[in-house]
Image (cartoon, helix red, strand yellow):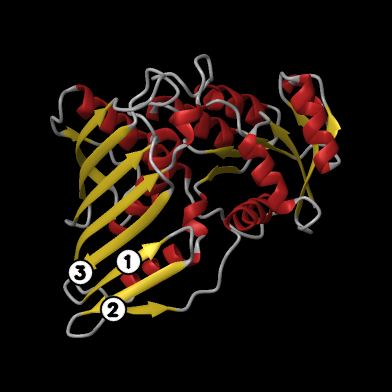
Amino acid sequence: MLRAASVGLGWWSNELAGAIQGKSDKIAITCCFTRSKEKCEAFSEKFSTQITDSYESVLEDPDIDAVILTTPHSLHAEHVTQAAAAGKHVFVEKPFTLTAESGRGAAQACTDHGVVLAVGQNRRFSAAAQRLKQMLDEGEFGTLLHIESHFSAPSALNWPAGHWRASRTESPAGGLAGLGIHMIDLVAWLGGAIQRTTALAKHRALEVDVDDTTSALFVLESGATSYLGSLCAAPYTVFCNVYGTKANAFAQVDANKLAVHPAGGSLSPIELTPVDTLKAELEEFADACDGEAEFRIHPDEAIHNVAVMEAITTSAERGGSPVDVPCYRSTS
Protein backbone atom coordinates (compact mmCIF):
# COMPACT_ATOMS: atom_id res chain seq x y z
CA MET A 1 0.00 0.00 0.00
CA LEU A 2 1.49 3.32 -1.11
CA ARG A 3 1.17 5.90 1.68
CA ALA A 4 0.54 9.34 0.22
CA ALA A 5 0.14 12.87 1.50
CA SER A 6 -2.38 15.19 -0.16
CA VAL A 7 -0.90 18.68 -0.45
CA GLY A 8 -2.95 21.69 -1.54
CA LEU A 9 -6.51 21.04 -0.45
CA GLY A 10 -9.39 22.19 -2.56
CA TRP A 11 -12.11 20.83 -4.80
CA TRP A 12 -9.80 18.66 -6.89
CA SER A 13 -7.90 17.16 -3.95
CA ASN A 14 -11.29 15.99 -2.67
CA GLU A 15 -12.12 14.45 -6.05
CA LEU A 16 -8.86 12.50 -6.10
CA ALA A 17 -9.21 11.36 -2.50
CA GLY A 18 -12.81 10.34 -3.05
CA ALA A 19 -11.75 8.04 -5.87
CA ILE A 20 -9.34 5.97 -3.77
CA GLN A 21 -9.81 6.44 -0.05
CA GLY A 22 -11.23 3.23 1.34
CA LYS A 23 -11.67 1.94 -2.22
CA SER A 24 -8.15 0.97 -3.26
CA ASP A 25 -5.78 -1.67 -1.96
CA LYS A 26 -2.85 0.00 -3.75
CA ILE A 27 -2.80 3.59 -2.46
CA ALA A 28 -4.17 5.51 0.51
CA ILE A 29 -3.89 9.10 1.70
CA THR A 30 -2.57 9.08 5.24
CA CYS A 31 -1.99 12.78 5.86
CA CYS A 32 -2.75 16.17 4.41
CA PHE A 33 -1.49 19.73 4.38
CA THR A 34 -2.53 23.13 3.12
CA ARG A 35 -2.11 26.60 4.59
CA SER A 36 -5.76 26.80 5.64
CA LYS A 37 -6.38 25.14 9.01
CA GLU A 38 -10.10 24.88 8.21
CA LYS A 39 -9.47 23.06 4.93
CA CYS A 40 -7.04 20.68 6.65
CA GLU A 41 -9.57 19.84 9.34
CA ALA A 42 -12.37 19.34 6.83
CA PHE A 43 -10.27 17.09 4.59
CA SER A 44 -8.92 15.11 7.56
CA GLU A 45 -12.40 14.51 8.95
CA LYS A 46 -13.85 13.53 5.57
CA PHE A 47 -11.07 11.14 4.55
CA SER A 48 -9.72 10.02 7.96
CA THR A 49 -6.19 11.35 7.58
CA GLN A 50 -3.67 12.97 9.86
CA ILE A 51 -2.79 16.66 9.51
CA THR A 52 0.73 18.02 9.18
CA ASP A 53 1.73 21.62 9.84
CA SER A 54 3.97 22.24 6.82
CA TYR A 55 5.11 20.85 3.49
CA GLU A 56 8.54 20.37 5.03
CA SER A 57 6.96 18.14 7.68
CA VAL A 58 5.39 16.02 4.96
CA LEU A 59 8.74 15.59 3.23
CA GLU A 60 10.55 14.74 6.46
CA ASP A 61 8.02 12.06 7.48
CA PRO A 62 9.50 8.57 6.92
CA ASP A 63 5.99 7.10 6.90
CA ILE A 64 5.08 9.02 3.74
CA ASP A 65 6.04 7.36 0.44
CA ALA A 66 4.58 9.88 -2.00
CA VAL A 67 2.92 13.26 -2.38
CA ILE A 68 -0.20 14.13 -4.35
CA LEU A 69 0.17 17.78 -5.38
CA THR A 70 -2.91 19.86 -6.19
CA THR A 71 -1.21 23.15 -5.39
CA PRO A 72 -1.34 26.26 -7.63
CA HIS A 73 0.26 25.72 -11.04
CA SER A 74 3.07 28.20 -10.39
CA LEU A 75 4.25 26.15 -7.39
CA HIS A 76 4.40 22.76 -9.11
CA ALA A 77 8.02 22.90 -10.24
CA GLU A 78 9.26 23.93 -6.80
CA HIS A 79 7.12 21.40 -4.95
CA VAL A 80 8.06 18.54 -7.30
CA THR A 81 11.76 19.34 -6.97
CA GLN A 82 11.54 19.47 -3.17
CA ALA A 83 9.68 16.17 -3.01
CA ALA A 84 12.20 14.47 -5.29
CA ALA A 85 15.11 15.67 -3.13
CA ALA A 86 13.35 14.16 -0.11
CA GLY A 87 12.95 10.82 -1.91
CA LYS A 88 9.17 11.04 -2.25
CA HIS A 89 7.38 9.82 -5.35
CA VAL A 90 5.30 12.55 -7.01
CA PHE A 91 1.82 12.68 -8.46
CA VAL A 92 1.22 16.25 -9.65
CA GLU A 93 -1.89 17.64 -11.24
CA LYS A 94 -1.87 19.13 -14.71
CA PRO A 95 -0.45 21.31 -16.02
CA PHE A 96 2.87 19.81 -14.93
CA THR A 97 4.39 23.31 -14.74
CA LEU A 98 3.80 26.66 -16.41
CA THR A 99 7.01 26.66 -18.47
CA ALA A 100 8.76 23.86 -20.33
CA GLU A 101 12.07 25.00 -18.87
CA SER A 102 10.90 24.60 -15.27
CA GLY A 103 9.28 21.29 -16.22
CA ARG A 104 12.56 19.93 -17.53
CA GLY A 105 14.28 20.89 -14.28
CA ALA A 106 11.62 19.28 -12.10
CA ALA A 107 11.57 16.11 -14.19
CA GLN A 108 15.35 15.87 -14.05
CA ALA A 109 15.23 16.18 -10.26
CA CYS A 110 12.91 13.15 -10.14
CA THR A 111 15.26 11.20 -12.40
CA ASP A 112 18.30 12.19 -10.36
CA HIS A 113 16.71 11.05 -7.10
CA GLY A 114 15.15 7.89 -8.52
CA VAL A 115 11.50 8.75 -7.79
CA VAL A 116 8.43 8.27 -9.95
CA LEU A 117 6.89 11.35 -11.54
CA ALA A 118 3.26 11.10 -12.66
CA VAL A 119 1.23 13.97 -14.13
CA GLY A 120 -2.55 13.79 -13.80
CA GLN A 121 -3.74 13.72 -17.40
CA ASN A 122 -6.66 11.48 -16.46
CA ARG A 123 -8.53 11.69 -19.77
CA ARG A 124 -5.93 9.30 -21.22
CA PHE A 125 -7.51 6.63 -19.04
CA SER A 126 -11.08 7.11 -20.30
CA ALA A 127 -12.77 4.28 -22.15
CA ALA A 128 -13.56 6.49 -25.15
CA ALA A 129 -9.98 7.77 -25.47
CA GLN A 130 -8.59 4.25 -25.13
CA ARG A 131 -10.84 3.00 -27.93
CA LEU A 132 -9.87 5.91 -30.19
CA LYS A 133 -6.20 5.06 -29.65
CA GLN A 134 -6.85 1.39 -30.40
CA MET A 135 -8.67 2.28 -33.61
CA LEU A 136 -5.82 4.54 -34.72
CA ASP A 137 -3.17 1.94 -33.93
CA GLU A 138 -5.10 -0.71 -35.87
CA GLY A 139 -5.54 1.55 -38.90
CA GLU A 140 -9.33 1.78 -38.73
CA PHE A 141 -9.28 5.48 -39.64
CA GLY A 142 -7.09 4.97 -42.71
CA THR A 143 -5.04 8.14 -43.15
CA LEU A 144 -5.58 10.41 -40.16
CA LEU A 145 -6.76 13.79 -41.41
CA HIS A 146 -7.90 15.87 -38.45
CA ILE A 147 -8.65 15.79 -34.70
CA GLU A 148 -11.25 18.17 -33.29
CA SER A 149 -11.24 18.68 -29.51
CA HIS A 150 -13.11 20.87 -27.07
CA PHE A 151 -13.25 21.42 -23.32
CA SER A 152 -15.57 23.99 -21.76
CA ALA A 153 -16.67 24.52 -18.17
CA PRO A 154 -18.33 27.45 -16.37
CA SER A 155 -16.17 27.42 -13.23
CA ALA A 156 -14.34 30.67 -13.97
CA LEU A 157 -17.62 32.57 -13.80
CA ASN A 158 -17.44 32.04 -10.02
CA TRP A 159 -13.82 33.06 -9.49
CA PRO A 160 -13.68 36.03 -7.09
CA ALA A 161 -10.96 38.65 -7.33
CA GLY A 162 -7.95 37.30 -5.46
CA HIS A 163 -8.66 33.64 -6.26
CA TRP A 164 -5.36 32.01 -7.17
CA ARG A 165 -6.68 30.92 -10.57
CA ALA A 166 -7.94 34.42 -11.38
CA SER A 167 -4.65 35.66 -12.80
CA ARG A 168 -3.06 35.51 -16.21
CA THR A 169 0.00 33.84 -14.67
CA GLU A 170 -1.93 30.87 -13.26
CA SER A 171 -4.46 30.76 -16.12
CA PRO A 172 -2.60 31.56 -19.36
CA ALA A 173 -4.85 32.02 -22.39
CA GLY A 174 -7.92 31.50 -20.26
CA GLY A 175 -8.92 27.90 -19.54
CA LEU A 176 -5.86 26.22 -21.03
CA ALA A 177 -4.16 25.30 -17.76
CA GLY A 178 -7.28 23.87 -16.18
CA LEU A 179 -9.24 22.59 -19.18
CA GLY A 180 -7.54 22.74 -22.57
CA ILE A 181 -4.38 21.00 -21.32
CA HIS A 182 -6.39 17.76 -21.22
CA MET A 183 -7.21 18.05 -24.91
CA ILE A 184 -3.65 19.09 -25.78
CA ASP A 185 -2.52 15.83 -24.19
CA LEU A 186 -5.13 13.74 -26.03
CA VAL A 187 -4.43 15.33 -29.40
CA ALA A 188 -0.66 14.75 -29.11
CA TRP A 189 -1.17 11.19 -27.84
CA LEU A 190 -3.59 10.29 -30.61
CA GLY A 191 -2.18 12.22 -33.55
CA GLY A 192 1.48 12.81 -32.78
CA ALA A 193 3.41 15.65 -31.18
CA ILE A 194 2.11 19.15 -31.88
CA GLN A 195 4.62 20.98 -34.04
CA ARG A 196 3.01 24.38 -34.69
CA THR A 197 0.05 26.39 -33.49
CA THR A 198 -1.95 29.44 -34.47
CA ALA A 199 -4.18 30.67 -31.65
CA LEU A 200 -6.54 33.39 -30.46
CA ALA A 201 -7.68 34.17 -26.91
CA LYS A 202 -10.37 36.66 -25.91
CA HIS A 203 -11.82 38.14 -22.74
CA ARG A 204 -15.59 38.12 -23.21
CA ALA A 205 -17.55 37.38 -20.03
CA LEU A 206 -15.45 37.05 -16.89
CA GLU A 207 -15.33 39.71 -14.21
CA VAL A 208 -11.70 38.85 -13.44
CA ASP A 209 -8.89 39.72 -15.84
CA VAL A 210 -8.51 36.31 -17.47
CA ASP A 211 -9.32 35.31 -21.05
CA ASP A 212 -12.29 32.97 -21.28
CA THR A 213 -12.40 32.02 -24.97
CA THR A 214 -9.43 30.28 -26.59
CA SER A 215 -9.12 28.65 -30.02
CA ALA A 216 -6.05 26.99 -31.48
CA LEU A 217 -5.10 25.25 -34.73
CA PHE A 218 -2.32 22.67 -34.71
CA VAL A 219 -0.05 20.94 -37.20
CA LEU A 220 0.78 17.46 -35.90
CA GLU A 221 3.85 15.30 -36.28
CA SER A 222 1.74 12.78 -38.22
CA GLY A 223 0.94 15.43 -40.84
CA ALA A 224 -2.66 15.75 -39.69
CA THR A 225 -4.20 18.97 -38.43
CA SER A 226 -6.15 19.62 -35.25
CA TYR A 227 -8.41 22.17 -33.61
CA LEU A 228 -8.77 22.95 -29.90
CA GLY A 229 -11.49 25.03 -28.31
CA SER A 230 -11.19 25.87 -24.60
CA LEU A 231 -13.76 28.04 -22.82
CA CYS A 232 -13.85 28.62 -19.08
CA ALA A 233 -17.18 30.49 -19.03
CA ALA A 234 -19.48 28.12 -20.94
CA PRO A 235 -21.53 25.02 -20.01
CA TYR A 236 -19.61 21.79 -19.45
CA THR A 237 -18.70 20.17 -22.76
CA VAL A 238 -15.88 17.72 -23.47
CA PHE A 239 -15.34 15.94 -26.77
CA CYS A 240 -12.62 14.63 -29.03
CA ASN A 241 -13.51 13.74 -32.62
CA VAL A 242 -11.21 11.97 -35.07
CA TYR A 243 -11.50 12.15 -38.87
CA GLY A 244 -9.80 9.86 -41.38
CA THR A 245 -10.14 8.53 -44.91
CA LYS A 246 -11.85 5.32 -43.73
CA ALA A 247 -13.89 6.52 -40.76
CA ASN A 248 -14.86 9.37 -38.47
CA ALA A 249 -15.40 8.97 -34.72
CA PHE A 250 -17.18 11.20 -32.23
CA ALA A 251 -16.19 10.75 -28.60
CA GLN A 252 -17.73 12.29 -25.49
CA VAL A 253 -14.67 11.58 -23.41
CA ASP A 254 -16.12 12.03 -19.92
CA ALA A 255 -19.51 10.52 -20.71
CA ASN A 256 -18.00 7.25 -21.99
CA LYS A 257 -19.81 7.65 -25.30
CA LEU A 258 -18.36 6.93 -28.73
CA ALA A 259 -19.98 6.74 -32.15
CA VAL A 260 -18.20 5.72 -35.36
CA HIS A 261 -19.16 6.57 -38.95
CA PRO A 262 -17.23 4.32 -41.36
CA ALA A 263 -16.89 5.26 -45.00
CA GLY A 264 -19.92 3.93 -46.87
CA GLY A 265 -21.71 3.09 -43.62
CA SER A 266 -23.86 4.81 -41.03
CA LEU A 267 -23.18 6.35 -37.64
CA SER A 268 -23.20 3.65 -34.95
CA PRO A 269 -22.61 3.79 -31.17
CA ILE A 270 -19.81 1.69 -29.70
CA GLU A 271 -20.40 -0.03 -26.37
CA LEU A 272 -17.81 0.94 -23.76
CA THR A 273 -17.11 -0.16 -20.20
CA PRO A 274 -16.86 2.97 -18.03
CA VAL A 275 -13.55 3.69 -16.31
CA ASP A 276 -13.06 5.65 -13.09
CA THR A 277 -10.19 7.66 -14.54
CA LEU A 278 -9.09 9.17 -11.22
CA LYS A 279 -8.82 5.83 -9.47
CA ALA A 280 -7.15 4.31 -12.53
CA GLU A 281 -4.43 6.97 -12.76
CA LEU A 282 -3.67 6.92 -9.02
CA GLU A 283 -3.48 3.15 -8.92
CA GLU A 284 -1.20 3.10 -11.94
CA PHE A 285 0.96 5.65 -10.11
CA ALA A 286 1.08 3.28 -7.13
CA ASP A 287 2.04 0.37 -9.41
CA ALA A 288 4.81 2.48 -10.92
CA CYS A 289 6.14 3.32 -7.47
CA ASP A 290 6.19 -0.41 -6.65
CA GLY A 291 8.04 -1.14 -9.90
CA GLU A 292 5.12 -3.11 -11.32
CA ALA A 293 4.27 -0.80 -14.23
CA GLU A 294 5.34 2.35 -16.03
CA PHE A 295 3.08 5.37 -15.68
CA ARG A 296 1.63 5.97 -19.12
CA ILE A 297 2.25 9.73 -19.34
CA HIS A 298 5.99 10.11 -19.84
CA PRO A 299 7.50 13.27 -18.29
CA ASP A 300 8.63 14.39 -21.75
CA GLU A 301 5.02 14.25 -22.92
CA ALA A 302 3.93 16.35 -19.94
CA ILE A 303 6.67 18.87 -20.76
CA HIS A 304 5.53 18.92 -24.39
CA ASN A 305 1.98 19.70 -23.26
CA VAL A 306 3.33 22.69 -21.33
CA ALA A 307 5.38 23.81 -24.35
CA VAL A 308 2.19 23.72 -26.45
CA MET A 309 0.37 25.76 -23.81
CA GLU A 310 3.19 28.31 -23.91
CA ALA A 311 3.08 28.43 -27.72
CA ILE A 312 -0.70 28.96 -27.72
CA THR A 313 -0.31 31.83 -25.27
CA THR A 314 2.47 33.40 -27.34
CA SER A 315 0.52 33.05 -30.58
CA ALA A 316 -2.58 34.62 -29.01
CA GLU A 317 -0.52 37.52 -27.67
CA ARG A 318 0.80 38.07 -31.20
CA GLY A 319 -2.69 38.16 -32.69
CA GLY A 320 -2.62 34.64 -34.07
CA SER A 321 0.85 34.49 -35.58
CA PRO A 322 2.11 30.91 -36.06
CA VAL A 323 4.45 29.64 -33.33
CA ASP A 324 6.60 26.51 -33.56
CA VAL A 325 6.52 24.07 -30.62
CA PRO A 326 9.65 22.28 -29.40
CA CYS A 327 9.16 18.52 -29.54
CA TYR A 328 10.72 16.93 -26.46
CA ARG A 329 9.78 13.40 -27.38
CA SER A 330 8.64 12.07 -30.73
CA THR A 331 5.39 10.14 -30.48
CA SER A 332 5.85 8.27 -33.75
Q: Are marks 2 and 1 in contact (CB under 8 Å)?
A: yes
Circle 3: element type: strand
Q: Is residue 59 visible?
A: no
Label 2 and label 3: CA atoms lie apart by 14 Å
* Disc marking residue 250: 1
* Disc marking residue 267: 2
Q: Tell me the residue at 39%/26% (across/down).
A: 101
Q: Are marks 2 and 3 in contact (CB under 8 Å)?
A: no
Query: For mark 1, does the 10 Å Cα neighbourhood hold few (<14), some (14 to 19), or many (20 or more) residues?
Result: many
In the rendered image, which residue does mark 3 sit on?
A: 244
Residue extending farthest to the bottom is 265
Please, what is the three-letter code of the amino acid marked with disc 3?
A: Gly
Residue 106 position within the rendered picture, expressed as x and y whole percent measured from the top left? 52, 29
Q: Quadrant for residue 279, please give it.
A: bottom right
Q: Which numbered disc flags the more N-terminal residue, 1 or 3?
A: 3
Circle 1: element type: strand
Q: Nearer the viewer, residue 110 or 23?
A: 23
Residue 245 position within the rendered picture, expressed as x and y whole percent measured from the top left? 16, 73
